[in-house]
Amino acid sequence: LTLGIPKETATDERRVALVPDVIKRLGAKGVKVVVEPGAGEHALIPDALFEEAGATLSSDVWSADIVVKVAPPTADEVARLGSESILIGFLAPLSSPETATLLRDKGVTAFAMEAIPRISRAQAMDALSSQSNVAGYKSVLTAADHSTRFFPMLMTAAGTIPPAKVLVLGIGVAGLQALATARRLGAKTTGYDVRPETAEQVESLGATWLDLGIEAAGEGGYARELTQEERDQQQQALTDATKGFDVVITTALVPGRPAPRLVTAEAVEGMRPGSVIVDLAGETGGNCELTEPGQTVVKHDVTIVSPLNLASDMPEHASQLYARNVQSLVELMLETPEGASEPSLKLDWDDEIIAGAAITRDGEIVHPGAKKTVE
Ligand code: NAD
């Protein structure tokens, strides 16, 4: 059984789907890996390290039994897959109907890393979490870099500088990591979410819980979209709350919906000049009204940064974590018959992880969310 690892072609995508350490682990189980030359270049993993780990270097990665990518495939890339191919990667099932349609028309069996059910058994495969962790960490460093102020309190002979006040909006995986990282840098941290259970998580990280009295827990541990009335109430309350903060990091998402607008233009105007907003929700429109996705802008003397693929800015560790997620998923798809020297593919469609992660199969779109976006 062979895995193919193409070089990523999306702009600003620096990650690679497998790293040498994981290739060695898979090799020990009899899995062969073919890596496109230069695939690890942007993650600073030279071809020689892939070879040392047992991979073959070849541009013929698209005919492998399973092709593993990070970013969704382009139309050209889908065309290079065989109709018997299996593809694994981030496939944006809720926001990219084009990808699902292309894969369906090609007859590919495709699994989206985003669609892996978030159950305990699948934790090791949870690439949304592993990459959100990287993004949450990096969002704080990005904020610190753009800030004209110290994060830690400084007590010096030249006077005392108070610690920066950092507010994190949206306490999922990225938000929790942002709170932890900002605190490690010495900031005074506050967290806010509409899922009430996050209050305890915020406090366990030494941060203050901002209670605005709006609860909007949805299905599967996610938030639901707010009603217009709740939205107005939330925006008003946050406009008052953000005034005292030096840094606001926003990570709020509702699956398959535009990012909730949490920080209005009025709120930005109310912040002290020199403050910084890092908006991690740019890909779905942004949590801040003045965000320009992918850009860094200064409005009312507040710097608003909207990186679109922050995990890719730390390609070494992001790739390492992603590769371990992929390894766990691939292992679930294999069986080694008795006496066989290498494993063969066995997709157990009764397994909720396999079934839940599938986007296309047998010439059909099978993921309910992807189906809806195509209709
Ligand atoms: P996410 O990226 O989808 O959203 C980020 C946060 O934004 C969420 O906490 C959400 O509640 C919040 N949010 C949405 N709308 C908001 C609004 N209007 N105002 C304020 N906040 C708003 O979240 P995520 O990081 O993917 O985590 C989602 C859930 O999945 C969490 O419950 C998390 O604990 C859970 N999870 C479970 C597992 C597992 O069991 N394997 C792994 C990871 C995450």
Image (tube, helix red, strand yellow):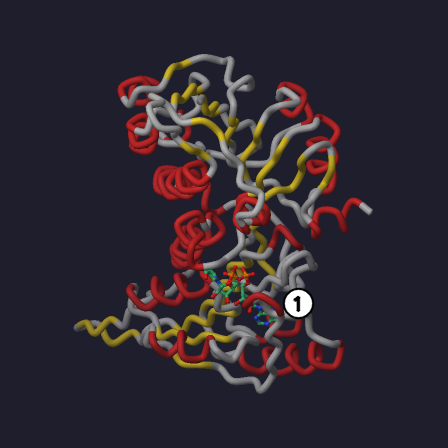
Q: Residue at x 30, y 64 (%)?
A: 185
Residue 24 x %, y %: 29, 28
Residue 166 quadrant: bottom left
Judging depth in this view, the residue of 334 and 86 nearest the camera is: 334
Q: Residue at x 60, y 69 (%)?
A: 223
Total numbered labels placed on residues in the image: 1
Amino acid type, mark 1:
Arg
The residue lying furthest to the left in this view is 157
**Residue matched to label 1:** 261
Judging depth in this view, the residue of 281 and 216 nearest the camera is: 216
State whether residue 176 is above or below residue 307. below
Residue 84 x %, y %: 62, 23
Residue 177 visible in rendering = yes
Circle 1 packing at 10 Å, graded few (<14), some (14-19), many (20+), is many
Residue 271 x %, y %: 54, 73
Residue 267 x %, y %: 61, 74
